[in-house]
Amino acid sequence: MADFGFKKRVSLQNLADAEVLIIDNAFTSDYFKITDFPQELTAGKNMFKLSGNSDLLDTGFPILFEIIPEGNPLKPIYLEVADYIDFAQRRIISPWVYHDDPTGLATLTILGVAIRRPNGKGVPFSWRKRYNIRWQRDVIIEPLKHNVTPINFKQQPRITINENVKSFLSESYYTHVPQVIVTQSNDAAYLDFSPVTSGWFSNAGTMFASPTNSALIFSSSMIGGTLTIPNPTASILNVSTNVYGTTYTPTNIPATMTDGSPNSLDYTATIIDVTNDTTLKLSQPYVFQYFYTQAGTGVRNTGNGNGGTLPTSQLHTEQPFAMGPMSNFTISFTEDPIEYTTSSLNLTSYANLIIANLSPITGDVYRVKTWMKSNGTAVWDVLSDEVVEGVELLVDKDNVYNMKRTGKFINQDLVNDYWESSSYATVAGVPPILKADSEVWMNGMIISGSEHFTGSQDQTGSNDEYIVAKCKKKIDVFKGCSYLLSFKAKAFEVLDDVTSDGTPKLGRTYMNVYVSGSAVDYGVPVNQPFGKKLDTQNLMGPVPQTGNALNQTFTQTSVNHRVNSWIGTPTATTVENLLPDVQSGTQPQVVADVMSFEFTPERDGQITPVFKVNHGKWFISEVSVRGISENGFTPNHIILEARVPQYQEDDVLDFKFEFFDYNGVRADLVLVTESISFAGGNTYINGQGYLGDGFVFDGTVSA
C-alpha cells in the first residue's frame, strides 16, 4: 500500500518520569484492568482494552497514556482512545504504528488518579485530586509486520453499487527496436541517453548512450522490465598496474560471488523507474568478481628469515566506471497498448462497487469478499475476493475499464481532452500553454506562459498575474474520507518582460495547489476560481539576486536556472512549441520527486486538482488522487469491480460484503445490499470456431 502524506503524532508527555505516590507493579493492574494486551504492536491500528476500577480510581479525571520506543524516546507512538465501549463495558485503546516507527522495545505508561492505596486505605490529602498512580508494561514494536488485530467498526461503511455494461476489448501495440549503443558510469544508477559518438565517458551516477535508432525513446511501460548488456566493453581498474581508465579483460571468473549471487561479466538489472524519455533508473550497479595473480617480491632469501613472497591468487571486486560506446543492450518489457478497440456486439455486465468510510477503529481490512444472488433466492455465489488497495481515482470513468489516467500525460490528445488552462493577467498577453512532454518527466505536462505577463513582478512571485491549469473531469469523493493528491514537479525560471530601462524582471518559480468542486469549501475571497488551497508552503525556488546572468540563447551549457524563453507575438514560422523546452545545462529551481497533499472533503461531492502558477515553466507528472493508505492501515475509499454472471436479462440482485484481516479472520460486521437492478450483458456468437446443430433464431418466430 502507499504511504501517508501526513501522519498523526502526539506530543511528548514524559509520563514515565512523573512523580507519583503509587507504582503499580502488578502484571494485570487492579486499578486499570487492562485486557487483550498484545505481545507486539504491528503495522496499523492495534488494540488493548481498559475498563478501569471505579472503586479505586477517581472517575472525574481522564486516564493518561504514553508509549515511548527505546529506539526514539523523543517520538512517542500515537495512541487513540476510541469512542467505543464493547459488550463487556471495556474501552478500546488503539496504538497506531507507522512504517517509520522504530522497531524494538517500547514502554507503555498509564497514569491515573487513585482514591485508595493497594492496601485499601485512602491516599493522603496532599495526593488527592492529582495524578498519583503509574502502571507500565513493555511491548515490542514491529512496524513491518502485517496487522492481525481484530477488526472493529464503530461507523458502518457506505456502499454504492452501479452496473457498468462494457464491450470486449482489443489492443494494439507499437513495434519497438530494443537494441541501442550504451556507455555506463560507475554505479549504474541511471541511464541517460544523450548523443555520444566515441571515446570513454564518466559522469557520477549516470549512463550515457547513443541509440542506434534515433526515433527510439523510453516509455513508462518499461518499468519492471529487464535491461541486459551482454559482456559490455568496460573501462576498469587494471589491478596489475593499478591504473584506471584502461581496457582490461579479466580472467579466472568464479561462477558465484562471495555472497552466493551469480557472477558474470554480463550486466542485468531491473528497470525500477523511467524518469523521462531519455533516463532509466536501474535496480543495481554493474559489479563482478575475478581472481588475479599478485606478483611476489622476488627478494632473495638471505638466511635471516626475510625472504621474498611468492605470487598469490587474489579475489577482486570490480565496479566499472564506464562502458564503451559500442556496448549494445536489450530491454525486455511488456508494452502499454497504444489503442483500444471495442465491439458493440459483445457486452458484459460488471458490478462497480464503491466502499467509502471504510475506517475500522482497530485492525486492518486486508480483503473484501463479495457475494451475489438473484433477489428472492437463498443461495449466495462468490462474486469477488480481492485484496484491498487504494485505487487511482483521477481516471476517466467513461473510458472502457477505467484504464485512462487523466493525470498521466501520455500524449497531447489526453492533455487537450482532459485539461484546460486560463490566464489572469493585468494586460492581455499570449495564452498559456499546456503541453504533453517527456523531456523532464516521463508522461509529463508543461504549464507555461508566465513569461508573457506584463504586470508587476516581485521576488515572491506575481500576486496579480497567474495561470490556472485544472482537470476538466471531476471525481467523486466522500465526506469523512481522507485523500492524497500527489505529483512530480520540476520548475525552471523564465525570463520575464523587461522594464523601460532594459532591466530584466526577476521572479522565482512559484505555484500553489488547490482542489476545486462541490465537495470542498473555497477559501477567501469566496469568489476566487481556485478552490480549497492544499499547500501550507508555496512551491517556490530560491530568491534571484540582482545582476544574475540572464541568457536567452539556445547554446548555453553552463549550469543555470533559466529555461529558454521566447517573448513576442507568435507568427506562422515562430511558435513556442517549436523551441526547445529546456536548454542544455539548465537546472531546475524546484525538484520534487513526490509532492503530497492531504485533504478531507467537507461533504459528499466532486473535486478536481488545480495548479495556480505565478511564475516559471512547470513540468508536472503522475498527478494522482487516492484514498490515503499505509501498510497496516485500511484505505477508506476503495473501488472494486467484478464481472456479473449472467443469470437472466434485467435481473434484480442482492450483494453481501465480508471483511477479513491478513490471516483470513472475518470481522463481525457483514453488510447486505438488496434489490439492485442489473440490465445484464449479452451473448454474441461469431467466427469460424463456432459449431452448432439446428437453428439459431435472433428475434421472435412469427406464426
Image (spheres, rainbow, N blue to C red):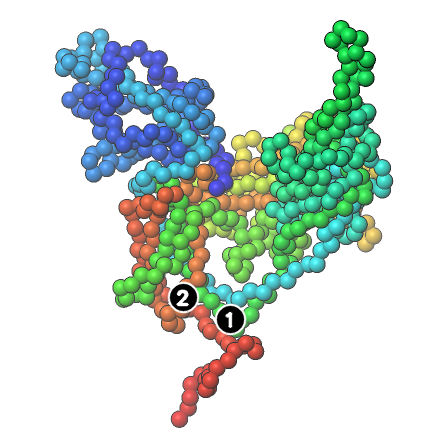
Camera-side residue: 684 or 568?
Answer: 684
Pointer 1 or 2: first along the chain: 1
Report whether 507 appears left or right of 347.
right
Task: Tell me the quarter of the image containing the C terminus.
Answer: bottom left
Q: Nearer the viewer, residue 664 or 605?
A: 664
Q: Which of 428 and 172 is in front in this view?
A: 172
Residue found at the very far right of the displayed protein: 198
Q: Mark 2 points at which residue?
A: 645
Q: Can residue 456 be seen in this view?
A: no
* Residue visible at 69% across and 32% down in the picture: 289
Could you say where residue 382 lies in the image, as x and y percent from the top left? 36, 59
403 w.r.t. 590: above or below: below
User: Observer-nearest residue: 420 or 272?
Assistant: 272
Amino acid type, callout 2: Pro
Residue 346: assigned label: 1
Tell me which corner region of the image, top left, top right, bottom left or bottom right, holds residue 618: top right
Q: Which residue is drawn at 47% across and 67% down?
A: 348
Q: Residue 258 carries which label?
A: none
* Quadrant hosting residue 320: top right
Q: Quick one: SS at disc 1?
A: strand
Residue most toward the top? 304
Residue at image position (81%, 14%) is 299
